[in-house]
Image (spheres, rainbow, N blue to C red):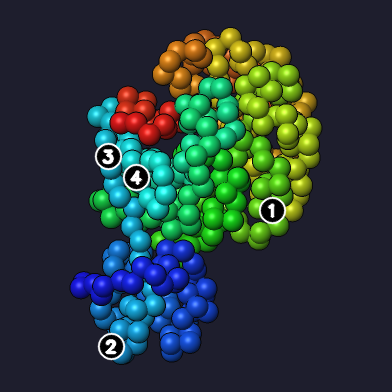
Amino acid sequence: MAEFKVNYRMAVILKNQTSDELYSRLSAIGLTPRQARQVQAAALKTGFIPRQLPDIPMRLMEKLAREVMLPHLNLTGKVTSPADGFTKYVFSGAGAGLFEAVRIPLMAGEKYVVCVSSQVGCGQGCIFCRTGAMGYKRDLLTWEIVDQVVKIAADSDKRITGVVFMGMGEPFMNYERVLQAARIMCEPCGLAVSAKAITISTAGIIPGILRLADSGFPFRLIVSLTAADPAVRLKLMPVEKKYPLHELVQAIRAYCEKTKNRVTIAWTMLRGVNVHEKDARDLAALLAGLPVNINLIDVNDPVGRYLPPTDQERAAFRDYLRMHTGMPVKRRYSGGKDIHAACGMLAESL
């Protein structure tokens, strides 16, 4: 489609609001709710401000083109793993710094999930994470989050069926924009990703967990725990100092009670550190009575400070967890290690 010249001084940014909000902003020029949905769909699926759309008069389209802007991320790098087909994309956006997203193939590449970033860098400082070593740089804007999926969808031969906020950054430290991006992604006239296929991961930011519980949206929640002993967790995840385990578990309980949804507990396994039977017993005591799933993830530390568990350690720890917690336990495959696209490895590099 042809594209009108966009006036970047205008305030209405496509990819930044839901279709209802777009209608609210543009009803003054005569746009109807149905037409707002058409504009939203065209902007997200074609990447252009269209010259014409069915049932929208040309004069209205010309007015629209003068009122909106449609910014784009710049793709600065892309690499696909020959080992497992994970693809890492490196973007620049409206502010300083590069950030990364990962396309994850499912069912032998029949569909994709996109792992998106919510910040440049991360301020949580988990010692086993390369992104945490970068420190916090800035929050991403709503459209910068949404456009990661738009750009990757345009570059993909199969449909994007899910989105996980597990890339660079702590999503709940950019709560408003993350939730807004998720709302846009799940609109039928947006990216049409099911709300139940959108997952938000947190290192344990309690206010964000409670706000998500009150939001009314069925987005899934993953909480990265990694240790059930407060002293051990504090050494691994500095967030423990501000949001201690006993308060975090209370927040998870409140979330489960309010939403009736299970929470996934992510446990990054570090050889010789948190894969003992005592760790399983501590976790069982901590989470007693909570409806959770447990995901086990091998640490990915390219500098070798922390190593993943041995096969024997991993199998034994899984068995301990099943025996002591009685909760569903799965090992989560963290792909793209060879291209630094796996969990904990995103740090502006190819």
> Among all residues in the image, which is located at the extreme front?
9
Q: In the visual, does 336 lie left or right of 223?
A: left
In the picture of the structure, the residue carrying the numbered disc 1 is: 211
Query: Mark 3 to mark 2: distance in Å?
Result: 38 Å
Is residue 269 or residue 90 the one in the foreground? 90
Q: Position of residue 33 (x, y in %)?
A: 47, 82
Residue type, label 2 = Met
Q: What kind of element bears circle 3? A: strand
**Figure quadrant of residue 104:** top left
Question: Tag 3 or tag 1, which sits nearer the N-term?
Answer: 3
Front residue (pair 73, 37)? 73
Q: Residues within 10 Å of mark 1 (few under 14, many from 20)?
A: few
Residue 280 at least partly seen: no
Residue 237 lies left or right of residue 313; in this view the side is right
Residue 192, image quadrant: bottom left
Distance of mark 1 from mark 4, alpha carbons?
29 Å
Q: Is residue 38 above or below residue 73?
A: below
- Check residue 58 in the rendering and tell me which mark sits there, or answer none: 2
Q: Earlier in the sequence, mark 1 or mark 4?
A: 4
Please state which amino acid type lies under the numbered disc 3: Gly
Disc 2 secondary structure class? helix
Which labelled disc corresponds to residue 91? 4
